[in-house]
Image (cartoon, rainbow, N blue to C red):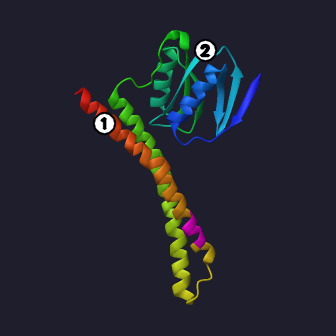
Amino acid sequence: MKKIVKKAYWNPEKEQTWINQMAAKGLALSDYSWWRYVFEETKPGEFIYRIDLLEQDTRHPESEVFLKFLEDSGVTVVATYLKWVYLRKKASDGPFEVYSDIESKIRLYRRILQFWSSLLAMVTVAVLVNFVVFIAELIATGTPDMWVNFACGILCTLIGILMYITLVQPVKKQIKKTQKEASVFE
């Protein structure tokens, strides 16, 4: 029996934890796309899941080589979305970590930071465009008829601030924390 869950996650570690909790209950992730998770019934705890953000698109030759290496190691690619890849391995095969060393984890966090920062940059462009249109209208006519642009600029500014606080800042903190761990081991 299939179970479809629509849920939004912004933090890949929390998403991964949730997917593994579902697997512990006997629901194995079988597909994913845009906040839509498809689960199938299985033995509780049969699989361990990991989520990765690849450096290149999944169809890029480097990504294909990496994913083939994982598959040769007993890892199944459950789903891909943009550069995100959802992986699983049988729990009976032992622990499952995609990145076992600190430097590769830091590189992963930097890719996630770059991903969120790119989205934040798009929002920033939207803010600037809306405010420039509003100001240009104000200068050209002396009366701002483009209040919609001003309102959109404010809304995009608030979205940008929210994105920075909830998406970008936590990843920056995770990078610093992991770097601090690395310096302890050196």
State the residue at coordinates (52%, 81%): 136
Q: Residue furthest toward the left?
A: 186
Quickly name the residue at label 2. 46
Task: Answer above or below: position of 7 versus 71.
Answer: below
Examine the rendering and report whether any part of residue 177 can be seen. yes
Residue 70 placement, left or right of 26: left
State the mark number for residue 31: none
Crowding near the residue tagged with mark 2, few <14, some 14–19, many ≥20 C-alpha atoms within 10 Å = some
Quickly name the residue at label 1. 179
Query: Residue 73 or 183: which is nearer the viewer?
Result: 183
Report the predominant secondary structure element of the magenta stretch. helix
Query: Residue 8 or 58: which is nearer the viewer?
Result: 8
State the residue at coordinates (29%, 36%): 180
Residue 130 placement, left or right of 110: right
Q: Position of residue 19 (x, y in %)?
A: 59, 28
Q: What is the CA distance from the residue labelled 1 to the residue labelled 2?
A: 33 Å
Amino acid identity at mark 1: Gln
Q: Is residue 7 magenta?
A: no
Q: Position of residue 42 (x, y in %)?
A: 68, 16
Task: Answer above or below: position of 131 versus 143.
Answer: above
Q: What quarter of the picture does the N terminus occupy?
A: top right
